Amino acid sequence: MHKLHINNSFTNSLPQDPITENYTRQVTGAAYSLAQPVAFKNAQVIHVSELAQELGFSEEEVKSTAFQELVTGQNLPDGTAPYAMAYAGHQFGNWAGQLGDGRAINLFEILHNENRWALQLKGAGPTPYSRRGDGFAVLRSSIREHLCSEAMHYLGVPTTRSLSLSLSGNDVLRDMLYDGNAAHEKGAVVCRVAPSFLRFGNFEYAAAQGENQYLQQLTDYTIDTFYQHITASGKAKYLQFFQEVTDRTLEMIIHWQRVGFVHGVMNTDNMSILGLTIDYGPYGWLEPYEHGWTPNTTDRQHKRYRYGAQPEIGLWNLLQLANALYELINDGPALEEILNNYKASYQSQYLAMMKSKIGLTSSQENDAELIATLEHHLQLHETDMTLFFRELAQVDAQMDANTAFVTISMAFYDLENLSEPHQWSWLEWLETYMKRLQLEQDVNGVDDTAFAKAKQQQMNATNPKYVLRNYIAQLVIDDADKGDYKLLNDVYRMLKNPYTDQPEFDHYYDLRPDWARNKVGCSMLSCSS
């Protein structure tokens, strides 16, 4: 295998925990603690993503024993010292204290084509931050993380990546629904890849310990390594850094709302300082469009992390980051201004995003009302988000409302029981929408055919046809648990081209099947992994 260009900026720049033994403990004044992956004698790689080629691995290398031993932590390059990061965080709105990488072990960083990549194993064994956990992961959750990381990348959503999915060869005891019925499941390891896995919680951890020197060291390292365009000094540097983290976080969440992704556990320790989607646990995809939906069983009562609340939670998490950085900035009004601007930016960016989903690029006075009415109608009767916006692309200004309604009707669950008043409200909205399309066409100054074609292309590039629906992931899990990985490979192939018509996968372009409505893994999920 080719020689990797290892460049460990994190461990070379930040303080190491002086205790080198791997046992659960409180750690102070350190950015990380050493932790070796467990020796899995029977580990088996079952899927490798195309990220391997982006990182410089050839097809021949990917099939090699050396590669398989690398991505399962069995044989690492000389001189590497795997480690777990120290961080803290707020979980479900409450301060949780020290958390850290309890199930993740960072291997090393590499430079390739002028890009920095950190490789990290999830499920490779315990670390000093494992708390009551064992540091392992199961196949069920690992499939979901592997596929969704890559699906989000191909959807154009900022995200961490997944290089490989492997069986560990060991069984892991898990209580999937926290109901006292623990059972053994197949263990697995995911090799996650990102420029950095730094989180809001790393900064909260330093601030909570009163380690202002370390806080500054950590922040300077982050700016110098990942925000190199920031050239200001002193307070201005840290304010610009916070502004850019705020902007990236908002951009990421707008993308989530665009594709119907619900993270499920937006704790501050699950928020990337680079604005990347990180930690794919009890996530889910909107099937019926519903602002109040969350996939996380732990959040069932209060629904803190529901789809419609994600932008607000992003702001709340940024407030906690602002509190952590305050000692470096010491300017509450300046930080408050950035947070207030988030609110205004969200409103404008969300409107622009929703307009793009319905094929509008120009601005008209009643656009916000048009969107709000649409969102209201979508939630009156179960309407599939993915199908609705994709089918709406076929509606043009020259249609009559009844034809347009038939066009979008495949998105309705239980169409036969759609009430007559609701159907009339849809016809009224479609009439208004098509008049708005005519205004859009007039602004563009093109003929009917050219406008309809351009609108459909633009909408189809915004609204995916294929997403990792919860039940699809469960079908992959069910087959993989039996040792059959064909569906894993097929679904991965589908997810690589989410905006393109793929006739061989059109059986997935349909309403969620009835059997999946309340099936475990298809409707609600736990954090158990």
Image (spheres, rainbow, N blue to C red):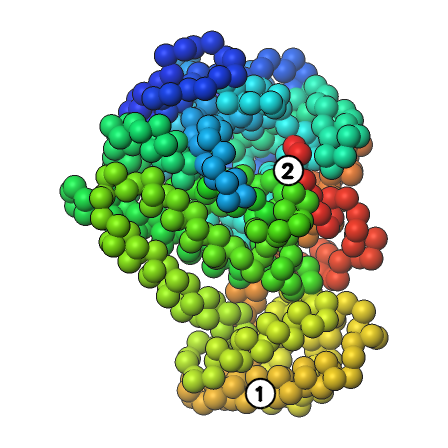
Q: Is residue 3 visible?
A: no
Circle 1 or circle 2, nearest the eye = 2
* SS for dot 2: loop
Q: Quadrant of residue 140?
A: top right
Looking at the picture, how far across and down is residue 190, in whole percent?
A: 58, 31
* SS for dot 1: helix
Of callouts 1 and 2, which one flags the residue occurring earlier in the amino acid sequence?
1
Q: Amino acid at mark 2?
A: Cys
Residue shown at 42% from the left, 26% from the top: 86
Q: Is residue 144 above or below residue 23?
A: below
Q: Quadrant of residue 397?
A: bottom right
Residue shown at 62% from the left, 68% from the top: 390
User: What residue does disc 1 label?
Assistant: 432
Q: Nearer the viewer, residue 453 or 390?
A: 390
Near mark 1 (Cα within 10 A), the count class, few <14, some 14-19 or many ≥20, is some
Which label belongs to residue 213?
none
Q: How many marks?
A: 2
User: What residue does disc 2 label?
Assistant: 527
Q: Nearer the viewer, residue 186 or 448?
A: 186
Residue shown at 42% from the left, 20% from the top: 27
- Is 80 placed left or right of 182 in the picture? left
Q: Amino acid at mark 1?
A: Thr
Q: Nearer the viewer, residue 247 or 116?
A: 247
Looking at the picture, how far across and down is residue 334, in whole percent?
A: 24, 54
Quadrant holding the C terminus = top right
Looking at the picture, how far across and down is residue 54, in whole percent?
A: 46, 38
